[in-house]
């Protein structure tokens, strides 16, 4: 048994570990004296009062026990730790709208020539096509007079007619040779000429097909060759073979018109640009520290696009690709994606804000930012022990991501569990007290002193005041 004098000495030592609360300001400051917790701006309590009611006790390596009076004055608040159940809105990015190159067509002529006609709008108006007009796939855009095309068609007709004549000559010589009335050499020469002409016809036809003439166009040329052999005059259709029609390859809006009647164009001239604006491209810039989070998102990643000029309006789109090059000046990477524009309200070149949401994880807890304390080595929270409101355990947590108002941590056996009550107001004061108070000793004497502290503190909590 310890003597009464020894008990009094140890009680005095125990009183040096106490903390008091601020009355009106509601905050604590820790004195530089080791093991003492004193109230800011108020005189120290008497030794007898401190001995009777120890306000704060470090009851374990990571546990604090407070008197109910101190807990009340500290304004501690707790809330259950909940699993993340709703989508997480990520920080927004700035970007700009652009044409979707997969929905953009540059219209060229297959052959060079002179522009002799511009197509008319299909909306019933008479003026020629202009920028901004809507066209449908197959609409006539322009007519070009191409001597190259006309010459190649004429060359095909000439080769066909010569082939027909040489076949007729070969057949007559063959008949004479079979009857023994003609030399075999003449027949063989005629047969060789037919074979040579067939190769020539095949080459010309192949060239026309590489120029994307259709089977119907080829059939018309063959038919013209047949008529020419019978009448020896060109039809009116053949006189217009140099006429080349340029038609819309897709439905959309005319974004550029670069020709007028009389212009000379070649196969490289961008005569028109037609775009489908129902879907636009989005180019956004993201800082490199946000890249790991974006690259870890499950595909496809949906995003929402807003415009400063249309407050309250949101447009849905999809993130397609995260760029592989970091801008050395801005330290940003380029995000490319798309946004739906069914009503045409979005315009190419507009500045936009892009927002994305992260789907909730099955193994994450959502905590208020104020509940997590950083001590420079790890992230910790204070958990209410049991049903009591005066015992709190410090426990490290694994932070996954941080935002302004929420922090997401891993739910695991070694850390925080769903449903446990965490301190959301006063966690920093508990951390300060934990750092200032010495950990409980393991010796027998200190164990006895710790037991006395628990007895006095529990008595005070049972009979407050």
Image: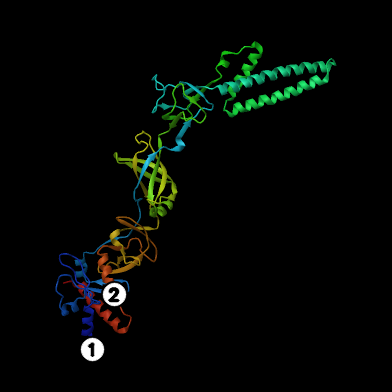
Mark 2–mark 1 CB contact (< 8 Å): no
Task: Classify 10 Å Cα crowding around label 2: few (below 14), some (14-19), many (20 and above).
Answer: some
Residue 242 in sight in this render: yes
Front residue of 20 and 242? 242
Quadrant position of the N terminus in the picture? bottom left
Q: Is residue 358 visible?
A: no
Q: How is the image coloured?
A: rainbow
N-terminal of the pair, mark 2 or mark 1, is 1
Q: Position of residue 97 (x, y in %)?
A: 38, 40
Q: Quadrant of residue 223?
A: top right
| Picture residue at 26% right of the left edge, 65% below the top | 428
For the C terminus, the image quarter is bottom left
Residue at image mark 2? 59
Q: Position of residue 95 (x, y in %)?
A: 36, 44
Residue 365 to residue 42: above or below: above
- Classify 11 as above or below 70: below
- The reply, left or right, for residue 345 in relation to residue 28 is right
Examine the image and state in which quarter residue 277 appears.
top left
Residue 188 drawn at (x, y percent): 79, 22
Mark 1 lies on a secondary structure that is loop
Which residue, given by chain and number where applicable, does mark 1 sit on? 3
Residue 122, placed above or below residue 377: above
- Viewer-nearest residue: 461 or 13: 13
Q: Name the residue at 35% across, 42% down.
A: 305
Q: Residue 300, image x and y in percent? A: 44, 46
Residue toward you, 355 or 175 = 175
């Amino acid at each position: 048994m310890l003597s009464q004098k020894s008990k009094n000495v140890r009680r005095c030592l125990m009183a040096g570990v106490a903390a008091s609360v601020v009355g009106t300001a509601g905050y604590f400051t820790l004195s530089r004296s080791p093991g003492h917790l004193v109230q800011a701006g108020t005189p120290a309590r008497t030794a007898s009062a401190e001995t009777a009611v120890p306000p704060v006790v470090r009851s374990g390596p990571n546990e604090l026990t407070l008197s109910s009076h101190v807990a009340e004055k500290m304004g501690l608040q707790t809330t259950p730790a909940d699993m993340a159940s709703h989508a997480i809105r990520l920080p927004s990015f700035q970007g700009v709208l652009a044409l979707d190159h997969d929905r953009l067509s540059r219209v060229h002529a297959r052959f060079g020539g002179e522009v002799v006609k511009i197509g008319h709008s299909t909306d019933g108006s008479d003026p020629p096509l202009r920028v901004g007009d809507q066209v449908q796939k197959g609409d006539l855009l322009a007519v070009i007079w191409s001597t190259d095309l006309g010459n190649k068609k004429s060359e095909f007709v000439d080769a066909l007619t010569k082939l027909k004549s040489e076949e007729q000559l070969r057949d007559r010589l063959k008949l004479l040779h079979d009857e023994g009335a003609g030399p075999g050499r003449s027949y063989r020469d005629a047969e060789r000429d037919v074979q040579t002409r067939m190769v020539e016809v095949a080459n010309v036809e192949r060239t026309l097909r590489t120029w994307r003439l259709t089977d119907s166009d080829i059939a018309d040329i063959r038919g013209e060759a047949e008529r020419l052999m019978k009448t020896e005059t060109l039809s009116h259709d053949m006189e217009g073979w140099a006429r080349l029609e340029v038609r819309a390859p897709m439905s959309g809006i005319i974004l550029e018109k670069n020709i007028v009647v009389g212009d000379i164009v070649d196969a490289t001239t961008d005569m028109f640009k037609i775009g489908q604006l129902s879907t636009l491209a989005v180019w956004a810039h993201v800082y490199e520290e946000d890249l790991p989070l974006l690259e870890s998102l499950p595909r496809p990643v949906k995003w929402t696009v807003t415009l400063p000029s249309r407050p309250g309006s949101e447009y849905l789109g999809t993130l397609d690709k995260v760029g592989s090059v970091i801008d050395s000046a801005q330290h940003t990477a380029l995000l490319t994606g798309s946004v739906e524009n069914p009503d045409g309200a979005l315009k190419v070149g507009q500045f936009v804000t892009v927002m994305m949401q992260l789907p909730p994880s099955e193994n994450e807890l959502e905590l208020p930012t104020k509940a997590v304390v950083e001590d420079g080595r790890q992230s910790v929270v204070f958990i209410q022990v049991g049903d009591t409101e005066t015992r709190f355990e410090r426990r490290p947590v694994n932070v996954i991501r941080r935002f302004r108002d929420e922090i997401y941590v891993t739910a695991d056996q070694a850390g925080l569990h769903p449903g446990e009550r965490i301190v959301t107001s006063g966690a920093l004061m508990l951390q300060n007290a934990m750092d200032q108070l010495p950990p409980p000793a393991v010796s027998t004497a200190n164990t006895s002193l710790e037991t006395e502290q628990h007895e006095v503190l529990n008595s005070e909590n049972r009979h407050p005041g």
